[in-house]
Image (cartoon, coloured by chain):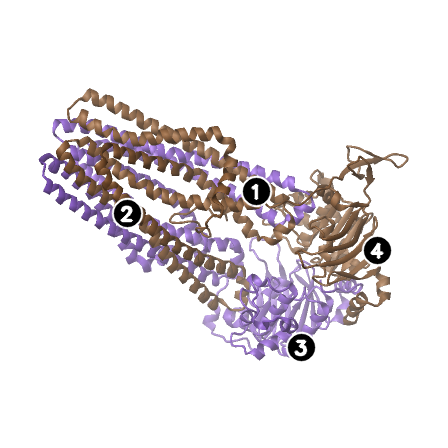
Chain colours: A purple, B brown
Amino acid sequence: MRNKLWPHARPYSLWIIAGVACSAMEAVFELLIPLVMSDIVDIGIANGDQAFILRKGGLMIALAVASLCFGLGAAVTSSVAGMGFGANLRRAEYDHIQTFAFSNIEHFSTASLVTRLTNDVHNLQMSLMMSMRLMVRAPVMLVAALFFSIRISYRLSNIFLVALPLLAVVVSILLVKTGPLFRSLQEKTDALNLVVQENLAGIRVVKSFVRGDHEREKFAERNNDLKSTSLRAFGKVVINMPLMMLIVYGTIIAVMWFGGQMVYAGTLEAGKLITYFTYISQIMMSLMMVSMIFMMLTRTVACAKRVTEVLSETPAITDDEAETQGTGMPADGSIDFDHVYFKYNAENADWILEDVNLHIPSGSTVGILGGTGSGKTSLVSLIPRLYEANKGSVSVGGKPVTAYTMERLRDAVSVVLQKNTLFTGTIRENLLWGDPGASEDQLWAACRAACADEFLERMPQGLDTDLGQGGVNVSGGQKQRLCIARAILKRPKVLILDDSTSAVDTATDAKIRAAFAQELKDATKLIIAQRVTSVQEADLILVMDGGKIAAQGTHEELLRSCDIYREVYQSQQEGGSIDG
Amino acid sequence: MAKRGPGPGGPPPGGGFRKPKNIRGTLGKLMAYLGRYKPHLVLVAVLLVVSSACTVGGSYLIRPLINDYILPGDFPGLARMLAVMALVYVLGAVCSFGYSRIMVHISQTTVAKIRADLFGKMQDLPLKFFDTHTHGELMSRYTNDIETVSEALNNSFGSLISCALNFSGTIAMMLFLNPALSLVTFGTLAVMLLVVKNIGSRSRRYFAAQQKALGEVNGYIEEMIEGQKVIKVFNHEKEAKADFQRRNEAYRSAAARAQIFSGMMMPAMGNLNYINYAVTCCVGALLAIRNGDLGGLAAFLQYSRQVGQPITQMSQQVNTLLSAVAGAERIFEIMETPPETDEGKVRLVRAAEDAEGNLTRVHYDNNTWAWLKPDGTLVPLRGDVRFDHVVFGYDEGRTILHDISLFAKPGQKIAFVGSTGAGKTTITSLINRFYEIQGGTITYDGIDVKDIAKESLRRSLGAVLQDTHLFSGTVAENIRYGRLDATDEEVEAAARLAGADGFIRHLPQGYQTVLSGSGGSLSQGERQLLNIARAACANPPVLILDEATSSIDTRTEKLIEKGMDRLMAGRTVFVIAHRLSTVRNAKAIMVLEQGEVIERGDHDDLLAQKGRYYQLYTGLAELA
């Protein structure tokens, strides 16, 4: 695990070393101060030597200033290293996600990837920073204070033989006891938040079924659960502090008793005894800090694991084969499926696509119809290699899709996804995704072909209209048309529309298809649709059913030969459909 | 994932230093929550004072210990004194445990109460509220804001008071021990306060910049990861990386600067305290040469080491407390939002009809319902809905529906067609009073809907809404959402009616399959079938179907047609549909255009009118 994370901190290794050194030096200088103080008491006061006192006082101030400088140094270095590490890690994780295939993204889920990139990395960078400040300081403090204490009085230091193990036991018992409680606290919090989230999303459902009380009960149950867990967890945590204080105080009293006798016997000076107190509180403070660090680290370990999982995910689809063969772009837009089998998850029992065989000549228009879950989207997803066929081969331009690099292949195959996204920015910026070098005329041509020109012309800022986050400033049908325009701008050899005009009215839909025939004469066009009217003029219509191609042919052929097709056609003939 | 409380080194992401607007008012409301813990709080106050007195007093004991017992060698006395000291410390520790434990109890029960109140309140808010607030915004009330309040009640509240007590106690003891020496300490303290103020305000500025940069990075991440599939399809990875790196870099430098400043606080305060210690030591030693009060010096030194700590701690706790007040303020803002108005007195009750057709109220389930008016008369529930010159807009000044009048007689099927934004969904939202109309009246069985208690009104209407929301839980639980006391047989019957039985039986655990993440594993069409089943289970006299079958392919739709017909039989139904085939057999079809009914009639009437409907219908026929 460390191996995955450390490379991103390595560029800052000098900063880390400097920071650790600063923290350590700060602690050492801090600890030297009480030692000087004991000289003031034992020599200065005892001899009434004012000059000595002033000299030693000056030394103490010098030590404090030195310690201050090191402390500030630690603050600077730990911040630079921590934040730098965070930035590197975030970048590495983000860049790695860019190599993910669709299946990798689905494996983690979008929400989880976002958390792993934001909260988890944030936690890790803070942990590195705080570790540099505290994790070094506490042990150095502990060791140095012990060392000085033993130097002051070897005999008196035997007290630590009792106090330290006692403290260690108390701290570890607490850690062991509270760890699982805090984990379950997190789970209960998540469970509670889920109810809130679902209620926010489904408030209309809750209200129309008058289920407010039902939801309140559901919430109350989890809320009480969370409450009792947090009572137990925090109830345990608050024992921590008083218990440690008791041990510290016990140690002080013991030192007073034994040290007091030694002072009277003359084997220990009074000033040394006072210094000794100081060290006791330092030792105990640093131990408390260690226990705090442990608490922090248990959370950090979980974050590190989650980030490492992302970093170690192997992209499901790579260019490995393509690079060895070094083929260029697909020669044309012909598509072949040869005994293709596909399922999303190897563990699933049923195939999503089963033994699909298909030849689509370049430049033809193909319509794909089929019921919910019949495998239409899966079929076209294999062409730009968004997913990989489990068995059989998919070819574009006469060569298997694996022979091209993904970049070349996807430049040639343009897909308008069912669930499509526009990004924050202007319409122009979004369209340029299709072709970064597109001229004004080309942009408008694409918009005309996608029938987006009519509403763009009505917008005061035209192409420079700001879309707002996630394209909230345009309607569903307008969004779909912009997505089509964006896809056309790629001038693809294969254009795939996955139910991309569902929110566009029939007349516009027909106009868009007519434009395709004009503008994209040479491209192979695959159109998935619900409406027969959207595909009936196609050169070839595929009827999908249960992961298989149930029938293929032209509109007339299918009307004669395919029952499903006829049924769908007739059901849609009875009444039309309008923009809704 | 829920964001936890302030992480190490600063406020939580998105938290920032948001200043509360009305500290006193908000604190007052918080105190009202704490009101029932008055006895607890008094006890906490007592324990706090005792524990501070013990901490401060314990250190003072060093003086007599050294001066009166150790130096003279009075060991029995030393033992007695140490026993006293032990008692003081134990008492202090017990008190400190006591008040922390009580505060945990108070804070966790209070926070649970606030959470429950907030959630309960949310159920009462009008839909308009949810339209104008994003989910993320409301979610953060539950996560960040409640978390900071909890944190503040749990820790900050107690520590702040304990710090203040310790600080003043220490100052008092120092003055008592040695007024002259105290002046040295006060000088240093003044410098420390200056440093806190200076670093604090700069650090606040840098933190604001850091939070802004963090917000930008996180926002970008969220948007890009959401659209990751589009990035892949357009080979846009390189640009996405470059854009990300720019924001990442901006955040890195802003964060480093902010952390440097906040990180400086600790060493600065700690070491200033050491300088104070050094000066005190010198001056104290010079004084001790004269008066020989070695124990006094030791005790004073102990105090001077302690005195700086509360300042640093307090400056941190004040920030936590301020952001908690800001959080509480946002929570109370929601709690004070006016709830849905519900002045209706007419209630829905079960009734039975005797031979003469007179209704009497009954308390058993017989599938007959009636409206109970406040004067005690019963009106049979029939499903007669009328709109009379209804005017409505979501926002003031922007009218969506202009003067809509329409009626649905019991058992009639009324359909709405029209393009997006014509106001179809709006009309159905008004029937169940999701929104308040600005003009005209809507009556239900002759009663103004405003006079019907909302709960009763909605209970009498079944809705299959456009957004097919499902809850985590089993398939059966989701269908049963329509009627909580439905038996398994009734649930399955409802599923069969909706044509959902087939696919449910193919799920791994059938009806007991757990749907997680709002049923994400189901296709949109399957979710719609479950929604229909849910409404069927509720068995309401009036049904609203808003694009209920839009994602179901036409073939499946054909298959469930019979079930739908049975579902609609005998009920008043409002249908909004995309496909004209679905609405063709409606009794009345309303063609809406920009918030006005431009045509009405049945299918044949409308075709005969040769208007918009005719164009839509035949225009398509031509295309086909």
What chain letter is assigned to the residue under label 4?
B
- Do pointers 3 and 1 mark residues of a single chain? no
Label 2 Cα crowd, 10 Å radius (few <14 / some 14-19 / many 20+): some
What chain letter is assigned to the residue under label 2?
B
Q: Which mark is residue B587?
A: 4
Residue A531 visible in the current orientation = yes
Query: SS of the residue at dot 4?
Result: loop
Q: Which mark is residue A517?
A: 3
Q: CA distance from mark 1 to mark 4?
A: 44 Å
User: Left or right of A424: which side holds B291?
Assistant: left
Label 1 Cα crowd, 10 Å radius (few <14 / some 14-19 / many 20+): some
Residue under the point 75% across and 59% down: B402
Query: SS of the residue at dot 3?
Result: helix
- According to the picture, the residue beneath numbered tag 1 turns out to be B118
Q: CA distance from mark 3 to mark 4?
A: 42 Å
Residue type, mark 3 in image: Ala
Instruction: State yes or no: discs 4 and 2 in contact (Cβ < 8 Å).
Output: no
Q: Vertically, is B606 above or below B93?
A: below
- Of the image marks 1 and 4, the number of the one nearer the N terminus: 1
The picture places residue A253, in percent across and down from the top left corner, at: 25, 28
Circle nearer the viewer, 3 or 1? 1
Q: Nearer the viewer, residue A497 or B531?
A: B531
Circle nearer the viewer, 4 or 2? 2
User: Left or right of A437: which side holds B365?
Assistant: right
- According to the picture, the residue beneath numbered tag 2 turns out to be B191
Q: Vertically, is B466 above or below A324?
A: above
- Of the image marks 4 and 2, the number of the one nearer the N terminus: 2
Residue type, mark 4 in image: Lys
Circle nearer the viewer, 1 or 2? 2
- Do pointers 1 and 2 mark residues of a single chain? yes
Q: CA distance from mark 4 to mark 2?
A: 85 Å
